[in-house]
Amino acid sequence: MTEGRPRTVLFLHAYPLSAAMWEDQKAALEAAGLTVLAPNLPGFGGEEGAITSLADTARDLLKTLPPDPTLLVGLSMGGYLALELLAQAPERFARAVLADTSARADDEEKQKDRRQQAERVLKEGKGFIIEAAREEHRPETFTRIRPMIEAATPQGIAGALRAMAARPDQRDTLRRLNLPLLALVGEQDDLTPPDLAGEIAELGHGERQIIPGAMHLSNLEAPEAFSAALLAFLR
């Protein structure tokens, strides 16, 4: 990495996982001399509390970052949070990677579904969340993420669902953005497909890169390709 370039990377994890999802990328980037920050968001990975809103969580995160511009990486819910950080304080970031995510707000049907899931998890527990993940992901991916979901609290899951349902459309944030941007997406991501990554890249004057063969959790499905894309872009 060239002297004087930012050396700290902030990783923001997906729902309903934890910072453990970034283990492969953390190892690769630290081996390249970068400092990695990978916090567990409230209610996940043993962290107490729950997300009240993405805006509040972003404000809290900004207080923890070093003074120099940081490299930003967020996947899925982590991408939503990354966009909120870029909306609040774009000057705090040198480059951004938005992976398997969307700049659009949820439509009414999706908002309703998230809020119903939030109520259900508080009443029933997270068993149905785990079973949904089993159906949604490949067996080897589910094996990796199951302990992360089991570590999440029902309150943390409910808070994240409500926060995602309430998040604003961030396409104007991308239009105003003035930093290098990479939209990464799994080729077989059905939740936030490649066309949404293309929209992010186009609005943010950045580039899109598709990870061959990967589904929604592309960093876990194709860790070497994902890490290589990060290193090439963040160096």
Image (tube, rainbow, N blue to C red):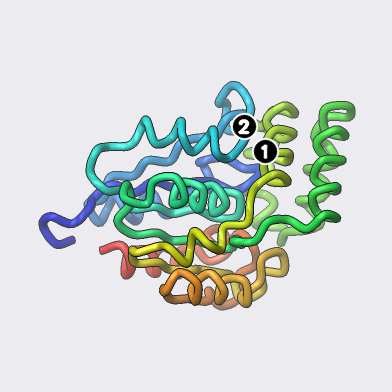
Q: Quadrant of residue 1?
A: bottom left
- Which quadrant does the C terminus fall into? bottom left
Q: Is residue 145 left or right of residue 129?
A: left
Q: Residues within 10 Å of mark 2 (few under 14, many from 20)?
A: many
Q: CA distance from mark 1 to mark 2?
A: 6 Å
Q: Amino acid at mark 2?
A: Ile
Q: Is residue 213 left or right of residue 205?
A: right
The answer to whether 199 is drawn above or below residue 167 in the figure is: below
Residue 222's x, y, as percent? Answer: 53, 66
Label pair 1/2, CB-CB below 8 angstroms: yes
Secondary element type, mark 1: helix
Q: Amino acid at mark 1?
A: Ala
- Residue 51: which numbered mark, if any? 2
- Residue 160: which numbered mark, if any? 1
Q: Quadrant of residue 140?
A: bottom right
**At 43% from the left edge and 76% from the top edge, which residue is drawn?**
207
Q: Is residue 153 left or right of residue 93?
A: right
Secondary element type, mark 2: loop
Residue 131's x, y, as percent? Answer: 83, 46
Out of 23 and 175, give the one closest to the viewer: 175
**At 44% from the left edge and 54% from the top edge, which residue is drawn?**
73
